[in-house]
Every structure is written in C-alpha cells, then in structure tokens.
C-alpha cells in the first residue's frame, strides 16, 4: 500500500525487478543498480569522482607511499570506488604501492579487521574500506594499532569516525540519503518517473568531505583544483580497470 518502495543496494536488483513487474502501477526506487522497467527509478552514483578526491588526499598525506584497500564484493559500485581511488592516489603519487584485498562479504567485520591489520603490518599507513559492515573491522584495526597521526582509514559513503575516533582522515561521501529523499520528494510533488539517475559531483549526490578538519589545507587546495577539473570536464576519472 506504499506510494514508493525503496530497495537499497545492488544485491536487491532481482527482488525489486520481480516485485515491480507484479505491481506495474506502483513506484519503485532502486539504489546502486539499473532496472529496465518503466515504474522503477534506478539511481546509480559516480563513486569514482569523490573516491578520486580522497585518493588525492591519501597520496599526499601518506608517509610510506603504501595504500590499502579492503573491499566487500567486487560489484560495479565497489569497482568504481576502487578504480577512482587508485587513480587519485597515482595522480599525485605515481610511485604508490597498493595492497588490495576482498572479503567476499559485506557483513564480516572480523574478516575486514584481519585484512586491514595485514595491510598495516605490511607498511600501509592509509586503508580505504569499501565493504559495508565488513569495513567496520578496518576501523577496529586502526583503533587497535593506535598510531594517531600516522595511520588512517578513509570513510566510504558516510563518516564513521565514531568507530575509531581520531583515525578517519576524510570521507568519500555517497548520498544514498540524498537519493532517497529526492525520490520521496518527487512522489509527493507528482514528478516521479522511471529511468536512470546518475548522481555525481555536479548533481550534488557525492562529494569530498573532511568533517573533522584533518586534511592539511595545502592538500585541500589540490583537491579543489582536481574537483574543478572534474566538474568542467577537463578530467575524466576512470570507472573500470580497462579505463
């Protein structure tokens, strides 16, 4: 009986597709995936854009030049995160080394902690978790090692600094809340329609954030310059391994 049914996450694609076909006169909003049905609004994000910007921060702040990435499952949104981040790091630190590990789960914080600890032990001083609940383990790892100012995690989607206060360098914001609110607003105003909405920096759906002011001002200057290049089209951030 709802006016709008929202499915958050790539892994809900089949479920939303199946149910939307049974209720062709109802509206559906699908986050992080694309469905080819007229009553489904598919919202995807340009995760690679803010991820590139936090990559610039990581590349400039890292002392060791070794960067870790802990992923959940290598689905398209996570790939965009990973590829954009690596490109951002390499833009300012061409000699950077990456350690990339996937837990094959978005709900295994113990595995996430194990993978992050291994990366820190191998010399990485910044780790980007793109792993849902699994990523909580990365915060547990950096908190346990307790090396303030020298080892960091970078937040994905939303700040999670409360999990390891003082150890989150910055955030690659992904506005799932922005997309859901906008879908609800459209329903209320009678303007909701199916199709694909691809939200990036220009649309306000993603962004670089430094909620705790831990990124040096000089580094932020580079980030602003790169963001301007992305917005005016002079820089195209890669989205796939091939690109």
Image: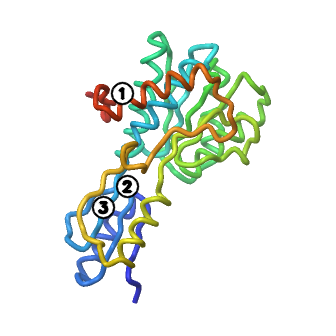
In percent of width and height, residue 138 lies at 64, 39
The first of marks 1 and 2 along the sequence is: 2
* Position above or below: 55 against 50: above
Residue 201 found in image quarter: top left
Cα distance between the residues tagged 1 and 3: 27 Å
Callout 2 secondary element: loop
Q: Which residue carries the number 3 mark?
A: 42
In percent of width and height, residue 15 lies at 34, 70
Q: Which residue carries the number 1 mark?
A: 229
Observer-side mark, 1 or 3, equals 1
Q: Residue furthest bottom?
A: 1
- Residue at horizontal 61 percent and vertical 26 percent from the top: 126
**Alpha-carbon neighbours of circle 1 within 10 Å: few (<14), some, or many (≥20)?**
few
Observer-side mark, 1 or 2, equals 1
Of residue 193 and residue 115, the one placed in the foreground of this image is 193
- Residue at horizontal 44 percent and vertical 65 percent from the top: 180
Q: Which residue carries the number 2 mark?
A: 32
**Alpha-carbon neighbours of circle 3 within 10 Å: few (<14), some, or many (≥20)?**
many
Q: Residue furthest top?
A: 95
* Position above or below: 136 against 48: below
Q: Are marks 3 and 2 in contact (CB under 8 Å)?
A: no
* Position above or below: 124 against 78: above
Name the quadrant of the N terminus: bottom left
Of residue 126 and residue 173, the one placed in the foreground of this image is 173
In percent of width and height, residue 61 lies at 61, 20
The first of marks 3 and 2 along the sequence is: 2
The first of marks 1 and 3 along the sequence is: 3
Callout 1 secondary element: helix
**Alpha-carbon neighbours of circle 2 within 10 Å: few (<14), some, or many (≥20)?**
many
Q: Are marks 1 and 2 in contact (CB under 8 Å)?
A: no
Callout 3 secondary element: strand
């Amino acid at each position: 009986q709802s006016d709008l049914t929202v499915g958050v996450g790539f892994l809900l694609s089949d479920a939303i597709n199946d149910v939307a076909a049974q209720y062709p006169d109802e509206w559906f909003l699908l986050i992080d995936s694309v469905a080819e049905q007229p009553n489904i609004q598919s919202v995807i994000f340009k995760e690679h854009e803010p991820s590139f910007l936090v990559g610039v921060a990581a590349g400039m702040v890292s002392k060791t030049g070794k960067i870790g990435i802990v992923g959940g499952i290598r689905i398209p949104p996570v790939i965009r995160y990973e590829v954009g981040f690596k490109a951002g790091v390499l833009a300012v630190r061409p000699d950077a080394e990456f350690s990339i590990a996937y837990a094959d789960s978005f709900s295994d914080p113990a595995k996430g902690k194990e993978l992050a600890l291994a990366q820190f032990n191998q010399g990485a001083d910044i780790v980007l978790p793109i792993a849902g609940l699994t990523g909580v383990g990365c915060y547990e790892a950096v908190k346990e090692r307790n090396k303030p100012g020298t080892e960091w995690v970078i937040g994905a989607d939303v700040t999670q600094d409360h999990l390891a206060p003082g150890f989150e360098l910055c955030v690659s914001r992904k506005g799932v809340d922005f997309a859901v609110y906008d879908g609800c607003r459209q329903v209320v105003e009678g303007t909701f329609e199916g199709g694909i909405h691809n939200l990036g920096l220009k649309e306000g759906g993603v962004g670089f954030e430094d909620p705790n002011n831990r990124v040096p001002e000089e580094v932020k200057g580079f980030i602003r310059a790169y963001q301007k290049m992305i917005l005016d089209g002079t820089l195209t951030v890669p989205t796939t391994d091939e690109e």
